[in-house]
Amino acid sequence: MHKAGDVIFGGLFQVHFFSDFPDLSFISEPRSPTCHGFDVLGFRQAQTMAFAIDEINRNSNLLPNVTLGYSLYDNCVKLGIGFRAALVIASGQAEQFILEETCIGAPPVLGIVGDSSSTRSIAISTVFGLYRVPMVSYFATCSCLSDRQKFPSFFRTIPSDSFQVRAMIQILNHFGWTWAGLLVSDDDYGLHAARSFQSDLAQSGEGCLAYLEVLPWGNDPAELRRIVDVMKKSTARVVIVFAHESHMINLMEEVVRQNVTGMQWIASEAWTAATVLQTPHLMPYLGGTLGIAIRRGEIPGLREFLLQIRPDQHHNNSNGNSMVNQFWEHTFQCRFPPPPASWMEAGGTLCTGQEDLEEVETDLLDISNLRPEYNVYKAVYALAYALDDMLKCKSGRGPFSDHSCGNLKRLEPWQLVYYLEKVNFTTPFGDQVSFDENGDALPIYDIMNWRWLPDGRTKFQNVGVVKRSAFKGEELTIDGDKIFWNFESKKPPRSVCSESCPPGTRMARKKGQPECCFDCIPCSEGKISNDTDSMECTSCPEDFWSNPQRDHCVPKKTEFLSYHEPLGICLTAASLLGTCICAVVLGIFIYHRRTPIVRANNSELSFQLLLSLKLCFLCSLLFIGRPSLWTCQLRHVAFGISFVLCVSCILVKTMVVLAVFKASKPGGGASLKWFGVVQQRGTVFVLTSIQAVICTVWIVSASPAPHKNTQYHNDKIVHECVVGSTVGFAVLLGYIGSLAVISFLMAFISRNLPDSFNEAKLITFSMLIFCAVWVAFVPAYISSPGKYSDAVEVFAILASSFGLLVALFGPKCYIILLRPERNTKKAIMGRIQS
């Protein structure tokens, strides 16, 4: 279809679906009998280009004094035919091109609108790029065409597949679909889309492909059966298809045959608007399809232009307008004369050219959903605005050599490429058109949904938009309430390889499977994950532990010998009881201080011993409660000094007993002068001072300190006092033990001395108890963990203290309180007199 003009724009459109003669030889012009299966929508796209050029010619503000013409060809969906047509357009072999006699002027075609296929666009643009002939495609989306090194003169008004792929990934993320299948056509469009999809999906980390299959060209039943079997066996409920509607027709035949339902289809822009698939036969399977669609636009005046088409003006095929004739014959089912004999024999009618388009149902006049046509419209205007900018150039200020400008007499295609790169205009529909450094237009897509209506019809409805802006980046907007879901639940399906791992678990990939397939492993003790699908479990801080659900850290339980637990209460009660008993005994002794049994063997030492025992009972309270620095230091100091004071008093009492009985023998009186009251006090003081020095050195060199022990229990903090210096603690205990052993030995020696009340026997028994308790204490203390080591030490203190208290003062209190007749000097000395 041709129209003369000062400047010619070429166009390549898909006006026929099939070709019977894949002849790739380079002849002057494709022969029309090679193509059949008229495509009304492709014809409408060609007519849209004719309308845009006619509109530009009528616009006095755009390209004034310049008339645009066009030369439009059918590619018949064949690479050979489309490539041949492009060369015919560019080389000017068509009869309609009449050059000036001097051969100086505009080239046969200054720019081309097309092609609709990525494969054909790659082939054509590879050649056209060598001569910088601008080519603006309205439907070729392969991301490979953005390579300016290979395709320096290629532009497009449709977004690249790289953006379409990212848009689909955003849709997957929006609905939580992480497990999907991908079907692609066996051409540049499908294969490049597959590579881009795999790369972008892996980079996003938001999903995985369950399978990737290549749809065969033509009807290959065996291969299609295998692909559908893969779809059935897969757990993926979402199927993404980058293919043409011809591929989908063959695929859906096999899908229907195997009755594969329950799939959520996502369509690329190549078949989103394919009405041939929106039939009652296929809607049980394709209903609810979500698709990426070219931006819909409005073209005022296009319908009126289409109604003016008349074959009576162009019925002579030699004028190169056979497209109109074929459309007319297809629409009204008639033939122009001379008709084939078989047509007339079959009762066919002749076309008069006076038929009324408004009286028939044809997709040509349905302009409610202009998508590829809108891209064609923008492509034509982009070429026109670029040409207009070039012709407005003022001599001496041009962008070319010597600041020259292009002109109609010597116009070169590469000059138009320069201005195409800088073109920027707004369509009547309000969309801005410009090209980036790769020749790609500002990307924007509509999100479409196939709504299956109760009456069996299909509604192709817009449910969202995805676009890229300079300020917000890529932005997806979907109205979920509008979407029709072809499932019983009327909700989006679940399509995941593995369900999300809840908090408290981590993901562990299944060996040999994609990263979306994983097991959920519970976090180990002490580690948590508080997010869904955590890759790793994080360790809790030192003073925290994981809760049973392993989803957050809680403070560790603390353990120490507390006043609030039964064990602590019992030990505290025993300590206070011992203290009270000591106080009572002390009161009894003070009250009966003048009686012989109290005065015997130095009553002052008895009072000191009672006071030291009282301190022993009280020091045990320092081992109960949460340890602090001062309690850790004080507990061992108080314990060591109290017990040394106690044992020192016993030792002095034992030594006094021996000295008294030695003095009663001839020549033994001199020994008493060494055991007077002053010497007794001095001995107790010196022995106690040694222990005080030991404690001081221990605290200064390696002081006991509170410590949080987590070795006994991972989920507990055991508060304990570390001794700081084991040597210091051993010296402290060893000193007490050595004094106790000496006291025991001396008391044991004195046990049989004549006296009706020999205190040496009581001291021997008390020291035996004392030594037995502390000998048993050492292994018990070492083997007891945590608070139980403190309990063992408290028990040893209380047991030894009670042992001393009962053994030393029990018999005396018995006599004082219950047998006062024995509390006389005569009774005590009776045995000696007898």
Image (spheres, grey):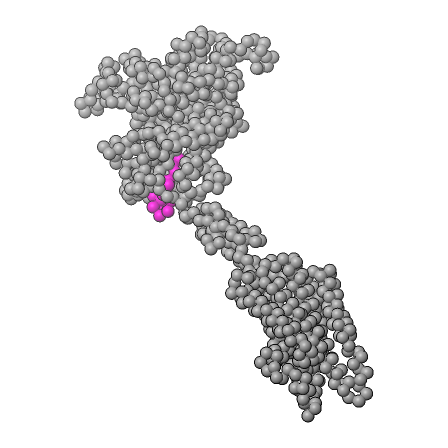
Q: Quadrant of the C terminus?
A: bottom right
- 493 relative to 743 in the view: left or right: left
Residue 466: x percent and y percent? 42, 30
Q: Residue at x 50, y 27 (%)?
A: 471
Residue 819: x percent and y percent? 59, 82
Q: Quadrant of residue 335?
A: top left
* Residue nearest the viewer, comparing 325 with 598: 598
Residue that sits furthest to the top in the current view: 65
* Residue nearest the viewer, comparing 558 with 221: 558
| 640 shown above or below 109 | below
| 121 shown above or below 799 | above
Q: Is residue 22 magenta?
A: no
| Residue 685 in sight | yes
Residue that sits furthest to the bottom in the current view: 834
Residue 569: x percent and y percent? 53, 65
* Residue nearest the viewer, comparing 603 with 555: 603
Q: Residue at x 73, y 76 (%)?
A: 652
Q: Residue at x 35, y 29 (%)?
A: 462
Magenta residue span:
226-245
Q: Residue at x 21, y 24 (%)?
A: 342
Total numbered badges shown on the rendered structure: 0
* Residue nearest the viewer, comparing 259 with 68: 259
| 679 shown above or below 481 | below
Residue 48: x percent and y percent? 36, 19
Q: Is residue 242 magenta?
A: yes
Q: Quadrant of the N terminus?
A: top left
| Residue 279 in sight | no
Q: Quadrant of residue 315?
A: top left
- 493 relative to 347 in the view: left or right: right
